[in-house]
Amino acid sequence: MFFISHRGNLKGPNKNEENKIEYIDKALQENFDVEIDLWFVKKNFYLGHDEPLYKVNRKYLRNKKFWIHAKNLDCFYELNNSKLNYFWHESDKVIFTSKGYFWNYPGTKLNRNKSIYVLPERSKKFDNTLNFKGICSDYIYKYKKIVEELKKK
């Protein structure tokens, strides 16, 4: 089961810290995977949700715990043929990541072996059947605890 911190968040959204290297690194130190927002502009990579803000190098991006959300098509194309785990979407309900997982928008049908349950906090009801391969959340501590309790039953 993958437990993925959304933009580095562990206990809820924090717009001032999301996608900052130190914030992401803290989530990694807590042994979570991290969904990061990545841009490619003028031959450089940048982290940032709404705009490119924090420059990063290719070496930093090689972390196997990253789920890279390409925020512009230039980034998506630049990541092509890399061994990184990345995806790009706009308003799609489900997309396919470069590593073969389904990135499921809240409320979509999940697949036990391939789905990443994205932002379950936005769903009307949590899928307590554990019919997914991982969770990406702003509240990843909370959802890890919920899953661990459900697995005990």
Image: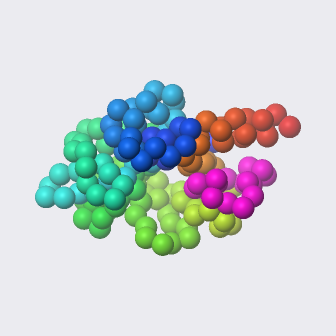
Residue furthest to the right: 153
Residue range highlighted in magenta = 114-132
On screen, residue 31 versus residue 126, left or right, reads left
Residue 125 is a magenta residue: yes
Report the magenta stretch's main SS: loop
Quarter of the image with the N terminus in it: top right
Residue at the (25%, 38%) spot, across then down: 59
On screen, residue 39 versus residue 124, left or right, reads left
Residue at the (62%, 62%) spot, across then down: 106
Residue 61 is a magenta residue: no
> x and y percent of residue 125 in the render?
75, 58
> x and y percent of residue 48 in the render?
32, 51
Q: Which colour style is shown?
A: rainbow
Q: Can I make out residue 34 in this image?
A: no
> Image height check: is 147 above or below 101?
above
Quarter of the image with the C terminus in it: top right
Residue furthest to the top: 29
> x and y percent of residue 41 in the render?
19, 58
Q: Can I make out residue 94 in this image?
A: yes
